[in-house]
Amino acid sequence: MTEEIIQSSSETMKKVAENIEKVMKGQSSAIRKLLVAFASGGHVLLEDFPGTGKTTLAKALALSINMKFSRIQFTPDLLPSDILGVSVFDQGQQSFHFHKGPIFTNILLSDEINRASPRTQSALLEAMAENQVSIEGTTYRFDDIFFVIATQNPVEFRGTYPLPEAQMDRFALKFSLGYVAPEQEVAMLSSQEVRHPIEDISACVSVEDVLQLRHNVKKVRISDELKRYIVDIVGATRGAPGIQLGASPRASLALIKAAQAVALLNGGGFVVPEHIQEIAAHVIAHRTVIDPQARFSGVTAESILDDIIKKIPVPA
Amino acid sequence: MSTPPFFLGATLLFWGWQAGFLWFAVAGAAVLEGSRLLRLRWDLSDTDLKRVIYLCDLLLIGGVVYVFVTAGRANLVDAFISLFRAAPLAILPLIVAQAYSTANRIDITLLRLVVRKKSAQKKDRPPRLVDLSYPYSAICLLSASAANVRAPWFYAGFAVLLAWALWAHRPRAAGPVIWVLLLVCVGGLGFAGHIGLNKLQGVVEEFAVAAQVPGDAPDAHKSKTAIGRIGSLKLSEKILLRVMTGKDGPRPPFLLQDAGYDLYGASTWFARGSVFKAVKPGQNGTTWDLHDAPSAKKSMSISAYLKGGTGVLALPRGASQIEGLPVREMKQSGFGTVTVSGGPSLVNYMVGFDTDVPQLAPPQETDLKVPLNLSPMFAKIADDLQLKARPPHEAIEAVTRYFSDNFHYATYTKKVEMKDPVQDFLLRSRSGHCEYFATATVLLLRAAGVPARYVTGYSVQEFSPLEKTYIVRSKHAHAWTLAFVDGAWRDVDTTPSSWFDAEKDSSGLTAVTDLWSWLVFKVSGLVWSDQKSRFAFYFIWIAVPALIVFVWKLYRKKGVFLRRTNQREQAAAVPQKGKDSEFYAIEGELARRGLGRQKWEPLTVWIDRISVDTAMPDLLRQIVSLHYRYRFDPDGLSGQEREALKEAARAWLANNDGR
Amino acid sequence: MRRLVYIWFRAFSGFRHRVTRRFTPAGRFVLAGIVASALFGLDTTKTTAYQAFTCLVTLVAAGFAWNIFFRVDLTALRVLPRFGSAGQTLSYRIRVTNSGDKQLQGLFLLENLPDPRPSFAEYSAAGSGIKPESRRWRQLIEMNQLAVADRQPMPALMPKSEVDVSTGFVPLRRGRIEFESLSVGRADLFGLINAYVTVPVKQHVLILPKRYALPDVKLPGNRAYQQGGVALSTSVADSEEFLSLREYRPGDPPRRIHWKSWAKTGKPIIKEYQDEFFVRHALILDTFMEGGSGEVFEEAISIAASFACTVQTQESLLDLLFVGTEAFCETIGRGQGQIEHFLEVLACVRPCYDKAFSVLHRHVVSRRSVISGCVCVLLAWDKHRSDFIHNLHVLGLRPIVIVVTDPERSNVPALGNVQEKPGWLNLLETGKIEEGLAKL
């Protein structure tokens, strides 16, 4: 991969980031992670308090790339057919027509995914895994670019169905937006005085650029030593105290791809240890299951990952 | 906490040197440090450890038995200190067991299980593994101090061992130079301090001597008599002295003096007229010459107990040389009183004496003084017996006859009718114990113009078939007169000679107590014996068989050879590219300055952290990016870039060497 | 007389604490050596131990002198987790910032926890039931002492930089640990005496109660219709279970149309749902402690916490009923996250002294209609409580009753003969709770 290709892909990502930044001020780190997940071809799980701008973020991303965007609000009475689509009987023609559900889109925002019943959750998650939907014998494929941003509300616990651990693997990254610094919040208030900035967003890169970007991410070089480092980190979660179920090899795959995306975002053609350490916790933490007893001692998956990273000597 | 290598052996050798058990210490140290060379270890179970602890208990209890048995006679503290000299030997088996065990630790909860066997075994008590090397070293040092070697070597050895231990465990942050300086200061101050302490004790002791309370032993300065006491004078059968005379020795009954007095008042005799002078010891510290020209025609050996190592010696008339007496100092007065201090609680000394040359202070004014209230009575009696007219030895004979004809011996006083008990004795009752006779004789002779002194001591009469020596009991304590006749002082005993018959006690119990007393004497002799080898001899007879049994049991267990674990560098499963990068030199330089990188910190994060303290951080970052390409880019560096990396690294190092 | 004993205990505990703080393990060994050599060397003529004594005393004095000039310029902040659990290690990090110009090496950190020694009032109020005074003292200290902290070595710190130190300790009981300050210490040149500088950092953390492992307990009760119970979120529609197909009625939402049936029959057919049936259990906690021992109360809390964690709440709800300043009802179910909330509530429960047991009795009876089954954890077994359980039986509930007993003082006056106790009544002794629970 030549230097120009690297630079062009890096430019693509930077342009999108700046564009989104216009709307979401003070969230540069979250925007970086979002783009990393997007470029590496994985999906994102956002766990955040209500009102921090999750929908705005997804919309801004979609608008920056000029792609289709749809949003599903999950409720306890949501049916799988509400997501995937339903075969409607047309009485006039005496035949069934398949009306595609909101999942047939490029960027999908699934709000409060833990509110729906497990049956509905698995419908979405299976579709994410397969990139296609089978209804009554017919298979409908998604577009090339299919990116899901699922959100969870950590505060409401009543009436929620937490995502099953085995399905958490579907999400490449999990992170949160959080509240911004006071200066940023003031700036946000000022910017939204007349109209919402999202209405002024326009596309800055094309779909081809994005496809090229995804292709280039896979070409980023990574040395064997760093692959071993990644495997060591993931392997350490399998025996760490306080973890009941460690991360699977799927985590290692996701981490490599994410590290490559980070390298490309920084304008480099190869991965260095800093890239790995930057997103390791976000890639691995949600795939582990904490021992319930340990959880009540205040241990979180992120803290265990932090300890693991501090224990393993980094290649230098 | 474990001791540094060879520390334990060195401490043991130091103890052996100071306490006189050097060969034992050499053997012990060889065994202990040999564990370093001979890499053979045993996995000692709890039962094995308990057996070792039993052995140590046996040795310790043996020592405690000595202490208990001798407690009645000798000073308990002295005996304990003397025994503590050998304590490391008793605990040596346990330390050897630890050194040769795989764990190199001892579970100290086991120590309790042995001492209190009755307590129910608490299974949930977790084993507390402790390395006993330091406690054992402390015991060795305390034992070395118990040996009481008064040279500065003890302090030097102690300080050196202490410094060694402190050096091994000093905190990493301490600079060595200032550490050594401070330690030397401490050593010096400590040395000054202990000399000061010693002097302080001397001062305190002198202060206390003035307020001395008279105890069982005779007081060299005054003798409170039992004159005037009503009732029976109870004297015990307790054996105080054991006397062995040669073939040409005096026949019983003969007298041994311990103290002489010259002034009488209020039923008490005082030694006023004479000063105590120190006696210089001979070459070996145990021979004492009481006179400038000692003449020892005959000799006898006396065994006596010295309470607290201090006391007055019982000596025959004419004693001029004493051998075999390991005391710190000896003083004698002109009255023939010899006091010693700083000795063991049981002494066995040889007295060389010549009865023809009794050297005592010549008579003085006080030797003729009669108390004013008694003076008229004595003058009258002297007149009655016409003592003044006669020559001295005739006067003495007359006095002796006077008493033996008209008086009789009694330990029972009915009542005292007259004002002064001596008066009552002389004029009315005409019966009393030896102190009456002696007091009356002295005063009467003085009234007759013969200088006389009052002497206390013992009358040796009884020969013990069991012990084959003369034994002197407490009831054989006697008082008599010393009269100056024909230019020499002579013993005059006016107590009716039947007095010892009167004192004969035919209680069957006496035989039993005498046997017990003999046993204790024999055992005390072992404890206080000058020859350490005798003590060691008994120790070997207990310890060696037990050790043989133990080693045999251990031989049946399989030993485990320690394999020297080769810490080979684990060959990296993944080849590490670019390990010859010049950047590592920079990393080393920064680490030396204390800015080292934590092992999990990636390079750019580290550089950002220390950028405040380093020069040319931007150059450093450039070097890092080149270094990263060298290491982690599968495409690697071009030749040009490789050179650039080398140059940049060299430049940075050159620039930063000075700082 | 009691006052003297109290003063002695207090002084001795304080002395021991200060010695342990001030002297390193090597320092304590040297201190023991000083005492031994002093005893041995009292008579300086008999042994030479007094020389060892002066040497060691000078050493210790030099150590103290070295420490006089210890100063550091530091700030610290603890990064504490949300909570910890009694009996399990609480790990956290302390971020230490060196605001001075010197490089700091060889330091360690030590948490200053509040003084656990009881006041004289507490000591005399503890009752005279416990015979050896020292045991009573130790029990009171254990009651007050939430944690014991250890020294934590700190890596070298450059000037104007910060470092994270990982540390932790095991909290001993539930409650709120108030950290007052942090001490930064350093051993002297010989490694015997510690010097300290105290950095005031006030923070707190909640410690959840200790939990026991429970066997698989089948709580009694049937699935019954619970109106509005599911999700407890009245803002969102009820979850529904498919019941049957029926004909369309005007007003039915179109999304419920079953298209296949329409195709077959030619008429719109609706899928019918019903509200969920599930079970709702009650965990009743007795907080009325009339002069009982604190340990009984703590064990009752632990048992309640164990039940809360073990009972599977995916398909049922669990109500915690207890009386504090008022009658409380905390509900969890349908989601893991709420167990932490439950435990946080339990961590702060205090005994209720001013109300009578009948308040709890009424509170439970008022909720009878929604309870399928219940577990009662009681602190004693007297007439009030036995009446209460009898009442529950009469109302049709079959409660599992657990009474926590104190082996030292009897709190089961209404029991009578132990052999004849009914099967649903379980007596658990403090100190043997785990075994007792295994037998349930």
Image (tube, rainbow, N blue to C red):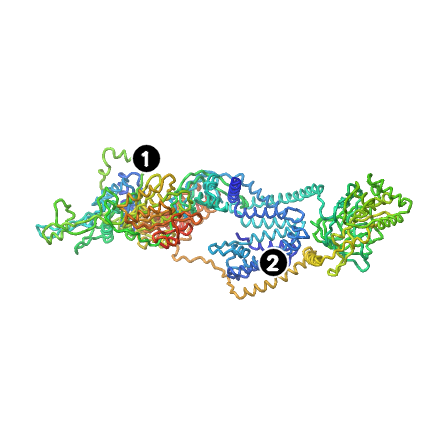
Mark 2 and mark 1 residues within 8 Å of each other at the beta carbon: no
Q: Nearer the viewer, residue C283 or C74?
A: C283
Residue A185 at x, y = what percent? 30, 36
Name the element at disc 2.
helix
In the rendered structure, which amino acid carries the disc numbered 2?
Leu
Residue that label 2 marks: B59
Q: Nearer the viewer, residue B198 or C177?
A: C177
Q: Report whether C44 appears left or right of C374.
A: right
Q: Report whether B209 appears left or right of A314.
A: right
Q: CA distance from mark 2 to mark 1?
A: 81 Å
Residue A83 at x, y = what percent? 20, 48
Q: Residue furthest right?
A: B389
Determine the chain carrying the residue at label 1: A
Camera sees residue A107: no
Residue B374 in the image: above or below residue B578: above
Residue B396 at x, y = what percent? 87, 48
Total marks placed: 2
Instruction: Answer few, some or many: residues within 10 Å of disc 1's Cα (few below 14, many 20 plus, some between 14 and 19).
Output: few
Camera sees residue B556: yes
Instruction: Answer few, some or many: residues within 10 Å of disc 2's Cα (few below 14, many 20 plus, some between 14 and 19).
Output: some
Name the element at disc 1.
helix
Q: Nearer the viewer, mark 2 or mark 1?
A: 2
Residue C260 in the image: above or below residue C286: below
| Dot label at residue B532 | none
Determine the chain carrying the residue at label 2: B
Residue that label 1 marks: A183
In the rendered structure, which amino acid carries the disc numbered 1?
Glu
Q: Report whether C1 appears left or right of C160.
A: right
